[in-house]
Image: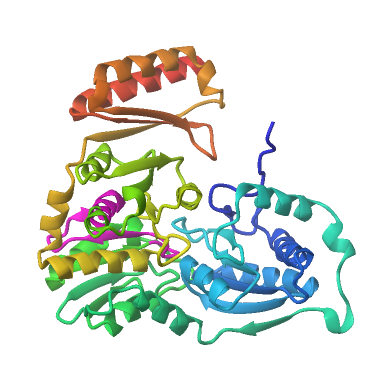
Amino acid sequence: MTKQRELFGTDGIRGLANAGAMTPEVAFRIGAAVTYQARQRGSKTPRVVIGKDTRISGYLFETALSSGVCAMGGRVMLSGPLPTPAIAHLTTSMRADVGVVISASHNPYQDNGIKIFGADGFKLPDEEELDLEALIAGDAIDKKRPTGLRVGTAERLDDAPGRYVAFVKATFPSELKLDGLRIVVDAANGAAYRVAPSVFAELGAEVFPLGVKPNGKNINKKAGALHPGTAAHEVLRHGADLGIALDGDADRVIVIDEKGNEIDGDTVMALCATRMIRQRRLRRKTLVATVMSNLGLERAIEAENGKLVRTAVGDRYVVEAMRKKGYNFGGEQSGHMVFLDHATTGDGLVAALQLVAIVLREGRPLSELAKEVMTRVPQVLVNVKLRDRQPLSEMARTQKAMADAVKKLGKNGRVLVRWSGTEAKLRVMIEGPSANRIERLANQIAEEARRDVG
């Protein structure tokens, strides 16, 4: 039986700041452990890039992680508040051994998290996180601490924001400009509060910035990708061509069209993937998405003679499938999009620029392009909080209700039932031609699950 990770979830470690697993003591040991691993791989003075978002607890964990790295003889390079994908980029461009991001992404300010990138700019695979957990829990890193002149150092990367802005701009087609475009940019008072408006302004757009005044506790609060209505309101107020709403660490994006309509990750992926197929830039004509992506996306790709490959929920699993099979584009309905030709992880700004390039090249409003590219199939998600977790295969009533729903929908719908990755909550997702019908079917499955668990 494969050993399960205890600290790391689907996207690093995350929780209430200064409690449980998210304490400075744990952060210190993470810093020491990643540096120890780098030394074991042959690096005499491991270089570790550390970035963060704008949460008040970021100072706490930045200091603790840095101390852990220095205690193991590493060299810390601090970027300050920058998007998660910026740290991945800096890790590779500066030939660092490790990249660490202090962020709880879309969670409220009370939470925080730690994500780790390898020297190649990709998130660590599950087995490497297991190795890290063993080091954190064991005593190996306590026996190998250097002394004297061999202890580590720390420095600030004052030019880090500029480096990242230049990188993102370089992913935009060189023959295009944003001159004349009016764009609302909502940085969610998060990690991209400085760099996001700069990217679009330097490419020529008239920018209306939102969520660019972080105070340590307003990250994601009524702003950004979690609350796209804020950007939508400003798009209409300013008569903008579109809006860009990022989450707290800017690795995902929700787009707003000129009419104030929300354009989610599925639609953005449909627009980008169909154009990449036509331009023969989508490898093997295959898009990678998770099981949560709408059936309409699958049909849109198939209409271009392409294929959709599905993975488990989590952008790390999307990236793993892409790397394993040689695909170059994938993402999630929630707005994570990974263009492997440009970046190693989800990047909200890179994704937004790829979409803007389509709008410019085709010379049509985003609302028209989005409406034509895919027809969304009605989708319902019911979350069932239960007493405890049981293997789904052993929940007989639930299995029968699922089979009945699959039979009734046939090829016109999908049924997906899975446990939450963090709590005793069963997620029932159904798609089909009738919203009322799929809601009834989802509630029937939920009710049988309650009877199974008791």
Instruction: Tell me the residue at 45%/52% (across/down).
Output: 326
- Residue 366 image-quadrant placement: bottom left
Q: Is residue 190 above or below residue 279?
A: below
Residue sitting nearer the eye, 93 or 192: 93
- Residue 115 image-quadrant placement: bottom right
Magenta stretch: give its range.
247-273
Q: Is residue 212 above or below residue 138?
A: below
Image coordinates of residue 427 in percent, x first then y, are 42, 32
Image coordinates of residue 23 in percent, x first then y, are 68, 59
Query: Is residue 203 at least partly visible in the picture?
Result: yes
In the displayed structure image, the side of residue 251 where residue 181 appears, left or right:
left
Q: Is residue 258 magenta?
A: yes
Instruction: Tell me the residue at 58%/47% (across/down).
Output: 9
In the displayed structure image, the side of residue 98 where residue 29 appears, left or right:
right
In the displayed structure image, the side of residue 58 where residue 127 appears, left or right:
right
Instruction: Tell me the residue at 37%/20% (across/down).
Output: 445
Query: Is residue 241 at least partly visible in the picture?
Result: no
Q: How many numbered discs sit on the rendered protein?
A: 0
In the displayed structure image, the side of residue 214 where residue 42 appears, left or right:
right
Q: Is residue 430 above or below residue 15?
A: above
